[in-house]
C-alpha cells in the first residue's frame, strides 16, 4: 500500500510528539519521586542545552534557579546525554565542595581540557608550588612588578592628563608576575598575554562534550583547539629544553628558584608515584598560566570600578592606607588594613572571576538531601548566585564593604540581621566561595589574593581615580562577558591622578 505524503507527515508528527512527552514524563517522574533535582523541561537529544545558549552562563543559571518561579537552589539539568546539577546556595555548595568533596574531586574530560591542556587532571604538585614559604621568597617579584605598573600608569596617562585601560594595564602586570614566578622570565619576552587571551577564547565546551554522536559538527572548533595546542607546545618545548640544559651545566645552588625548577625536579623522582612526565609538567604549567593571569587582573579592574562608583569607600580606603605612611604597600602592610580586605571580599562576592568555579563530575552515585545523583553527574557551584542570594546577604546587589564590620548598623539604623564579621574567602564560608573549596579549591589562592590586595592598595595609594570628562559613575557599563571565566564586557577607561 502506498501512503499519501500528508499521512506520512501526520504519522511522523504524532510519533515525535509521543517520543517528546514520553521522554519528559519519564524525567518528571523521577523529579516527583525526589530522585533528581527539579529543572527545566528538556528537549529530546539536546536536553536543556538550548536554554543555556548565550553569554554569561552564570547569569542564565542564576535566573533559572533563583528568578521568579525558579527551580530553586539545587537545580537539575540534562545537557545532551549528561546530567548536571547547579548549586545556588551555601547549603548545596557545602554538600558538593565539602561533604561529598571526594566524590566530586574530579574535573570532567571536556574536549578543550583533553585537546589543549594535555588532558591533565591532578592537583598534587600544584599545591606544593604555592606554599607560603615559596611565595614569601618570591614576594620581591610581585613588589617590583607592582612598582612597574604604577610607573607605567603614570607614563601612559601622561601624568594624569588622559585615560588608561585599567584592566589591560593590570593584566600586563599579572602576566609578568606569573611568568617570572613560573619561568623567571618576563611575559613580554614571548607575548604571554596574547597566548592567555587565545586560551580564554578557546576554553569553552562544545557539542561533543554533551552529545558525542554529533561530534562531527565540531570539526572546525576541534581543529582550532589542536592548532592552539600545537602553538602552546612549540612555546613550552624550547623553555623546558633550555632549562634542562641549564640543570646539566650549573650547580643546584645557582639554578633559578621558580615553579619550573620544582616541576622539572620531579621528572627524575625515584618514587614512581611522584614522578612527573613531560606532558604532565606542560599541563601543569599551562593550568597555572591560564588560571593565574586573567583572574587577578579582572578582580583588580572590578575593584577600581566599584571604588569609582562608591567614592566614600575609596576615600575611606585611602585614609586607611595613608596611615601606613609608605610609598609602596607590601603584603605585610596589608595585614594592618581591615577595610582593604573588606573591599576585596566585596569585590569577589559581586564579581567572582570564575563565577561557576571550575566544573566537577561525580565518580560514584551520591545522595544529597532527598536527591540521588548518578555517577557521572556534572556539578556547577554558582558562586555568583550564592553571592547575590538574599538568604545569605542583606542588600545583596549593593557594594557595601561595611557589611563585614562589627556592630554595623543597617540602612534603617537597626543592627544588621546577618553577622558577616568572620566571613572570608578561604573556602570555609560557603556563602562566599570565589576560590572554591575542598581538595580542588584554587591552588593559587594565596598568590591570587595577594596580587589583588597589594595591587589595589598601591593603585589607590598612588592615584585618585577619575572618569573621562562627561562620564558619570552611574554610566559605567557593569556587564560581564565570558562563560567559564568572565571579565568586564566594556573595559574600564579611567584617569589616574597622582596623589
Ligand atoms: C583572583 C584570583 C583567582 C581566583 C578568583 C581563582 C579562582 C579559582 C577557582 C574558582 C578555581 C576552581 C576551584 C574549585 O573547583 O573549587 C580555581 C582553580 C585553580 N586555580 Fe585559581 N583563582 C585565582 C588565581 C589563581 C592564581 C594566581 C593561580 C596560579 C598562578 C591559580 C591557579 C589555579 C589552579 C592551578 C587551579 C586548578 C586547581 C585544581 O584543579 O585542583 N589561581 N581558581
Image (tube, rainbow, N blue to C red):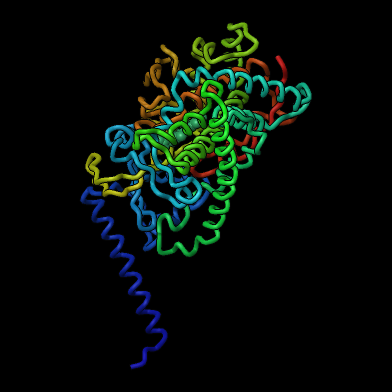
| Residue 209 appears in the figure | yes
| Vertical side of 37 occupied by 464: above or below | above
Residue 435 visible in rendering: no
Q: Is residue 355 left or right of residue 41?
A: right
Asked where in the image residue 147 lies, by quadrant, the reply is: top right
Residue 93, x across and y down, in percent:
34, 35
How many marks on residues? 0
Q: Is residue 370 left or right of residue 317?
A: left
Viewer-closest of 129 and 336: 129
- Residue found 41% across the figure and 29% down from its top: 127
Q: Up-down: is 31 above or below 98?
A: below
Q: Residue at x 37, y 79 (%)?
A: 10
Report the front residue among 56 and 261.
261
Question: Residue 95, percent across and down?
Answer: 29, 35
Taking 95 as reference, is 7 above or below it?
A: below
The residue lying toward the viewer, choosing from 254 and 376, is 254
Q: Quadrant of the N terminus?
A: bottom left
> Residue 426 is drawn in which quadrant?
top left
Image quarter where the C terminus lies is top right
Q: Residue at x 59, y 13 (%)?
A: 329
Q: Give the residue displayed 57% in from the left and 35% down from the top.
A: 245
* Left or right of residue 171, residue 64 in this image: left
Q: Give the residue furthest to the bottom.
A: 1
> Residue 98, percent across and down?
30, 32
Amino acid at each position: 500500500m502506498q501512503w499519501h505524503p500528508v499521512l506520512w507527515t501526520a504519522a511522523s508528527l504524532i510519533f515525535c510528539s509521543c517520543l517528546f512527552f514520553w521522554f519528559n514524563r519519564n524525567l518528571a517522574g523521577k523529579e516527583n519521586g525526589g530522585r533528581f533535582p527539579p529543572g527545566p523541561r528538556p528537549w529530546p537529544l539536546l536536553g536543556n542545552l538550548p536554554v543555556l545558549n548565550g553569554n554569561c552562563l552564570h547569569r542564565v543559571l542564576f535566573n533559572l534557579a533563583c528568578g521568579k518561579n525558579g527551580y530553586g537552589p539545587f537545580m537539575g539539568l540534562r545537557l545532551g546525554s549528561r546530567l548536571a546539577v547547579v548549586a545556588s546556595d551555601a547549603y548545596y555548595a557545602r554538600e558538593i565542595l565539602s561533604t561529598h568533596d571526594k566524590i566530586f574531586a574530579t574535573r570532567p574530560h571536556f574536549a578543550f581540557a583533553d585537546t589543549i591542556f594535555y588532558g591533565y587532571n591532578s592537583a598534587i604538585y600544584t599545591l606544593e608550588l604555592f606554599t607560603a614559604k615559596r611565595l614569601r621568597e618570591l614576594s620581591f617579584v610581585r613588589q617590583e612588578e607592582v612598582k612597574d605598573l604604577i610607573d607605567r600608569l603614570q607614563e601612559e596617562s601622561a601624568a594624569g592628563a588622559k585615560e588608561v585601560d585599567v584592566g589591560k594595564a593590570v593584566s600586563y602586570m599579572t602576566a609578568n608576575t606569573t611568568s617570572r614566578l613560573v619561568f623567571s622570565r618576563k611575559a613580554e619576552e614571548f607575548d604571554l598575554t596574547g597566548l592567555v587571551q587565545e586560551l580564554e577564547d578557546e576554553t569553552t565546551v562544545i557539542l561533543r562534550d554533551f552529545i558525542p554522536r554529533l561530534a562531527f559538527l565540531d570539526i572546525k572548533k576541534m581543529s582550532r583547539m589542536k592548532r592552539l595546542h600545537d602553538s602552546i607546545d612549540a612555546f613550552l618545548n624550547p623553555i623546558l629544553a633550555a632549562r634542562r640544559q641549564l640543570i646539566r651545566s650549573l650547580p643546584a645552588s645557582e639554578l633559578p628558584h621558580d615553579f619550573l625548577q620544582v616541576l622539572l625536579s620531579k621528572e627524575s623522582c625515584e618514587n614512581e608515584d611522584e614522578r612527573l612526565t613531560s606532558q604532565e609538567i606542560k599541563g601543569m604549567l599551562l593550568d597555572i598560566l591560564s588560571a593565574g593571569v586573567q583572574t587577578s587582573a579582572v578582580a583588580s579592574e572590578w575593584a577600581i570600578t566599584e571604588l569609582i562608583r562608591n567614592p566614600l569607600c575609596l576615600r575611606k580606603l585611602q585614609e586607611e592606607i595613608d596611615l601606613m605612611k609608605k610609598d609602596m604597600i607590601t603584603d605585610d602592610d596589608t595585614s594592618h588594613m581591615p577595610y582593604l580586605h573588606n573591599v576585596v571580599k566585596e569585590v569577589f562576592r559581586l564579581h567572582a572571576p570564575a563565577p561557576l568555579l571550575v566544573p566537577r563530575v561525580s565518580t560514584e552515585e551520591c545522595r544529597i538531601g532527598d536527591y540521588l545523583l548518578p555517577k557521572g553527574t556534572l556539578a556547577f557551584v554558582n558562586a555568583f548566585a550564592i553571592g547575590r542570594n538574599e538568604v545569605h546577604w542583606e542588600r545583596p546587589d549593593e557594594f557595601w564593604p561595611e557589611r563585614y564590620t562589627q556592630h554595623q548598623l543597617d540602612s534603617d539604623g537597626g543592627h544588621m540581621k546577618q553577622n558577616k564579621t568572620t566571613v572570608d574567602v578561604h573556602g570555609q564560608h560557603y556563602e562566599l566561595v570565589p576560590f572554591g573549596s575542598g581538595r580542588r579549591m584554587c591552588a593559587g589562592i594565596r598568590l591570587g589574593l595577594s596580587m589583588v590586595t597589594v595591587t589595589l592598595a598601591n593603585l589607590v595609594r598612588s592615584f585618585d581615580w577619575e572618569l573621562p570628562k562627561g562620564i558619570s559613575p552611574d554610566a559605567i557599563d557593569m556587564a560581564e562577558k565570558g562563560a567559564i571565566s568572565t571579565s568586564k564586557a566594556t573595559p574600564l577607561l579611567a584617569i589616574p591622578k597622582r596623589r
